[in-house]
Amino acid sequence: MKLIFSKLISLFTAFLFLITGITGSTVGFTDGTPLKTTKHEYKFNNNKLLIGGYYATEDELQYCKDAGIEFIVASGVNEKYLDTAYENGIGIIATDYNLPYCYCEMTDSAVDRYVNASVEAYRNHPALWGDNMIDEPSAGYYGKIAKAVDAYNSKFPDKIPFVNLFPIYANKDQLGEQMTLNSLSALLTPTSDHFTDYVNRYKAYTSDYINTVDTDYICVDIYPLHAKLNRNGETVKYTSENWLRNLDILAEACRATDKDLWVITQAAGLTENGIKNGDVRWCDETSDISQQVYASLAFGSKTIIHALFGRQGWWDVDSHMIGSDGKPTATYYAASEVDSWLADFAEVYGNYKYTSTYLLNRSKAAGYKSGGLSCEIASERGNIKSSDGLLVGTFTGDNASKAYIITNIEELNRNSNAKFSFDVPDGKVATVYYKGNVTNKVSDFKMEIGAGEGVYITVK
């Protein structure tokens, strides 16, 4: 019955898209055709789940290994820094080391530096994974970025040119997309956030990227967790309603163009306990990190980058993974715990290809407003049943094997557990990876997971 209802909703939404002239898909949203993705053999192994961090001073690199951090997007890099990173087994994506770093805009002189870069003069190092090219570019600069990326890839084929996109809550000037929908679309906004300016501007932003820039991944930084104080001065946690749609748009684009999704998650904030009108909060509890990570994995993310790792950067220093005293914080230990869970299946995760994402009991989902997920494939539903709010990612492997990421996606302020049942096909074995424990199931089973927690399950 639920499958039939889902199909009816999909048909109705398709009708609304038809009469408004809006397309639900990001692919083909703007003029042009998505580029064929060129896959690269980097010096690092991107055939598994990777865990990174944002910023670290040289004396902080010693803390990476215990936190499960495999690489750092770093500034202030020199040869001594790279030597220390190598000694600690940490890869480095360097900012302003060999080549220029840009923010939002890419100048002609920066493009020329990439186009005319000398392979002989490039300061290579065994710890160097690549170069931080541009952060949060406006779409108007995609053509210049494409030129720089192509030149970089031809000269340094084992290095990554790191490009990180704006999140969905950036304004139209930042995105460089000025789309405004018609009045009919505005009337339909309550039925689906597909009929909103900000969603369609972000689809345009993403569509223009895949039509113009040939990277084999798409990276985004999105910080969805907030806190405010109620009338009694009590902390109320809440989540940006555009979070899951942001991931949905990018995951659909990645799936269609055979790119990996990289997500920079929130591991820092501006308010520890909330303020009157709300602000981004500290993420010093395991559930804060876990929900973001498992939600990203449910959309097929191949790389998670915690921001912020080091005491450099933005927001309250003591909310970072390394605090103002240069020592690990509660955020560090929360992220470390989650990363230890991921380590159990990081290699296995890379053996499966992302297929779809869907919500169960969407009215209970945090970070979600309305409308179906573009990544959903109705036929992938059915073997997971629950009356709680769950975000489910499905994956396909060799010999008809399957894998699933199941995330308790209910608002963390509720501090509620989620229960579900899982159907195991006859003759198959389900392997369950949950909080450091790995168990096999040969028949249908039930599970309960805590607030913000996730579980990885393979079936073969």
Image (cartoon, rainbow, N blue to C red):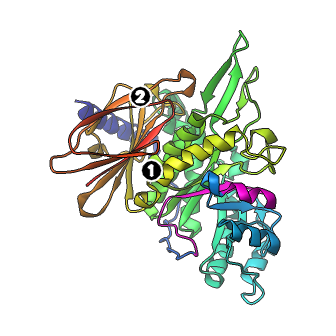
Image position of 381 with respect to 362: above or below: below
Please tell me how crowded label 1 is: few (under 14), some (14-19), or many (20+) other residues with Cα within 10 Å. some
> Where the C terminus falls, by quadrant?
bottom left
Q: Amino acid at mark 1?
A: Ser
- Label at residue 308: none
Q: Is residue 169 visible?
A: no
Q: Which residues are magenta?
A: 43-64
Give the SS element for disc 1.
loop
> x, y percentage for residue 137?
70, 58
* Amino acid type of the residue tagged 2 in the rendering: Ala
Q: Which residue is mark 2?
A: 418
Quarter holding residue 332 = top right
Q: Height in image: 460 above or below 154?
A: above
Which residue is under mark 1? 25
Label 2 sits on a secondary structure element that is: strand
- 220 vs 98, left or right, is left
Answer above or below: position of 89 versus 115. Answer: above
Location of residue 190 in the rendering, given as x and y in whole percent from the top left corner: 49, 27
Identify the residue at image location x=78%, y=46%.
Answer: 327
